Amino acid sequence: MAKVLAVLSNGYTDEEHNYVTGWWAEELFAPALELEKEGHTVGLASIDGGKPVVDPLSLSKDYDPDGIYKKQYESGMADKTTPIVDVKASDYDAIMIVGGHGAMFDLAHNEDLHAVINIMYELGGIVSAVCHGPAPLIYTKTREGRGILEGLKVTGYPNANEPEEVVDLLPFSLEDELSRIADYHEEKEQDAYVVWGSKQILTGRDPQSSQLFGRELAQKLTQRELKTEEKLVD
């Protein structure tokens, strides 16, 4: 079946404000489970490789009351990632950029990640991101110089939900930057919200949307695999 590359933040620390962030546990593990249910495989990458920093809040009782994601994290499932410079984009059918505030710091402007995204996109792969994961997509431009999200319907973590204590510590507003180049939607009345901006671009709003996000990606990849098999039979 399909191969998916999940990209995680290596983390960010602001010692002056006692602020530590990284990737958000639910936004990796919930989609990964949906993908694996469909028979797809998930590989992990980060900018620097090695063990990326998980946002400690995502493993807390407030956000993981049953300890589901903490257990998966402690099992070592996300201990090893490939440096993004060593990733061969053509080996994958989709890229999934995991959220967490960390994505806004080390993933957003990384040119090596932008290159992997572009190659995968040009080869017809699916580019997906959840919560703060769309951060690098904002700054990814195609070979022709067009923004990869330009004019598309997208979603991502809304300003209204950002914790007051971290707003001034963030490098930019995700909602504002998405709205600048794309057609941003929040859909407040829905518990979970994802949107296909095109047949190749999928975004999810927040941690609560992670499972639906993963299911949508998994099903789309399965449909593609089946169509490919049908063509081969014909």
Image (cartoon, grey):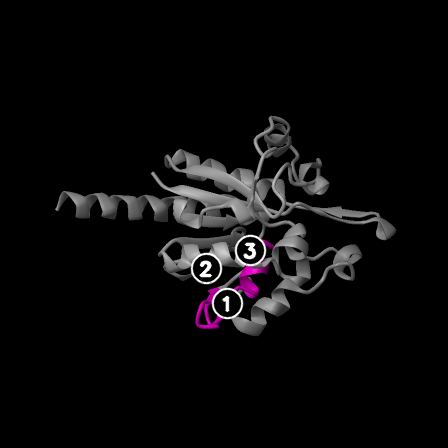
Mark positioned earlier in the residue sequence (3 or 1): 3
Estimate the x, y position of residue 233 in percent, counting from the top left.
Answer: 14, 43
Please name the amino acid that badge 3 sits on: Asp
Quadrant position of the N terminus in the picture? top left
Whether the magenta-drawn stretch holds residue 197 is answered as no
Spatial CA distance of label 2 from label 1 is 8 Å
Q: Is residue 46 visible in the rendered structure shown here?
A: yes
- The percent coordinates of residue 111 (x first, y second) are 57, 59
Q: Residue at x 53, y 65 (%)?
A: 185
Q: What residue did someone put label 3 on? A: 112
Labels 2 and 1 touching (C-beta < 8 A): yes
Viewer-side label of 2, 3: 3
Find the distance from the CA under tag 3 to the CA under tag 1. 12 Å
Q: Does residue 79 sit above or below 135 in this rendering?
A: above
Judge from the rendering whether residue 161 lies leftward or rightward of residue 228; answer left or right: right
Can the viewer see residue 216? no
Asked if the stretch drawn in magenta spans residue 136, the answer is yes
The numbered mark at residue 118 is: 2
Rendered residue at 29%/44% (across/down) = 225
In the image, 191 versus 42, the foreground residue is: 42
In contact (CB < 8 Å): disc 2 and disc 3 = no
Whole-percent x and y of residue 83? Answer: 57, 44
Which region of the structure is painted magenta?
131-153
Distance from the alpha carbon under mark 2 to that under mark 3: 10 Å
What residue sits right under mark 1 in the picture? 141
Q: Residue at x 54, y 72 (%)?
A: 181
Image-quadrant location for residue 23: top right
